[in-house]
Each structure stands twice: as C-alpha cells, then as structure tokens.
Image (spheres, rainbow, N blue to C red):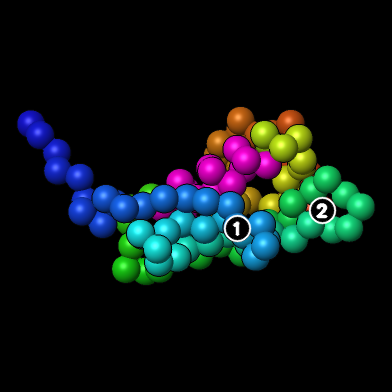
C-alpha cells in the first residue's frame, strides 16, 4: 500500500521571525500560520500568547509542527517557556520533552 503525500505540504517550511516575535509556518513565501510570543524585559522567558494556522491547511498537523519547532528552538537557546496560548499549553500537557523548561502560569498545571 502506498501513500500519497498531500500536495499542500510540498513547500512548507518553519522559521523564526524574531523581529515580529513569532515563529512562522510558510507555504513558499506565504505565511500560513504563526505562534506569537512576548519576551518580558530582563528575563530569559518566551511567553507564548497565540497560535493560528490558515483553515485552508487544517488537518495537516501544521500547528503541531510549528509549535514543536518553536519549543525546540527555545530549548536550544537555554530560555524558558511560558504557555499562555491554549494550543501551546495543550501541546505541552501531552508532550513532555520540555517539562524541565516550562514555567506554568498559575492555575494551568
């Protein structure tokens, strides 16, 4: 049995856009989703506040791919993760590879 990859995935890339304080998922040059964060002054924390992906790309696992990339990047920098975004929090509750660098907001653990 062979599987055919969804053609919408052919040109998908993920990148950090630090000037916009977000990670982006792109289809070619078009931004089709992002996860936005804040960096409180004087801290080594990225506070994730919102994640969205264009509904035309729904069901392809792109939000998960985007968030995995972002959290792995934060881990590589030695910074900490604060999940205010419901999607990022849900991801972290089911994927535990970053447990040691998560600062849960009060009431979210």
Question: Quadrant where the N terminus lies?
Answer: top left
Q: Residue at x 79, y 53 (%)?
A: 105
Position of 72 with respect to 78 (left or right) is left
Quadrant of residue 97 in the image?
top right
Q: Earlier in the sequence, mark 2 or mark 1?
A: 1
Q: Secondary structure at mark 2?
A: loop
Position of 102 with respect to 86 (left or right) is right
Residue 98 within the segment the image draws in magenta? no
Is most of the magenta stretch helix, strand or loop?
helix
Q: Residue at x 40, y 63 (%)?
A: 29
Mark carried by residue 106: 2
Residue 35 lies, in percent from the top left, at 58, 59
Residue 69 within the segment the image draws in magenta? yes
**Cα distance in 3D space between marks 2 and 1:** 28 Å
Quadrant of residue 22 in the image?
bottom right
Q: Residue at x 74, y 51 (%)?
A: 46
Quadrant of residue 26 in the image?
bottom left
Q: Which residue is mark 1?
A: 17
Magenta-colored span? 62-74
Q: Are marks 2 and 1 in contact (CB under 8 Å)?
A: no
Residue 47 lies, in percent from the top left, at 74, 55
Q: In this rendering, is residue 20 above or below 75?
A: below
Of residues 61 and 33, the one drawn nearer to the viewer in this rendering? 33
Q: Residue at x 52, y 58 (%)?
A: 24
Residue 51 lies, in percent from the top left, at 56, 62
Q: Nearer the viewer, mark 2 or mark 1?
A: 1
Answer whether residue 1 is visible to the viewer in this image.
yes
Position of 84 with respect to 66 (left or right) is right
Query: Please, which residue is most extreme toward the left here?
Result: 1
Of residues 48 and 109, the one drawn nearer to the viewer in this rendering? 48
């Amino acid at each position: 049995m062979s599987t055919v990859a969804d053609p919408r995935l052919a040109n998908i890339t993920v990148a950090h856009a630090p000037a916009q304080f977000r990670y982006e998922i792109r289809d070619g040059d078009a931004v089709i989703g992002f996860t936005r964060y804040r960096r409180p002054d004087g801290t080594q924390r990225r506070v994730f506040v919102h994640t969205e992906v264009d509904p035309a790309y729904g069901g392809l696992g792109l939000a998960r791919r985007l968030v995995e990339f972002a959290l792995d990047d934060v881990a590589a920098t030695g910074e900490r993760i604060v999940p205010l975004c419901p999607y990022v929090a849900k991801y972290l509750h089911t994927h535990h590879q970053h447990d040691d660098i998560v600062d849960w907001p009060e009431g979210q653990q």
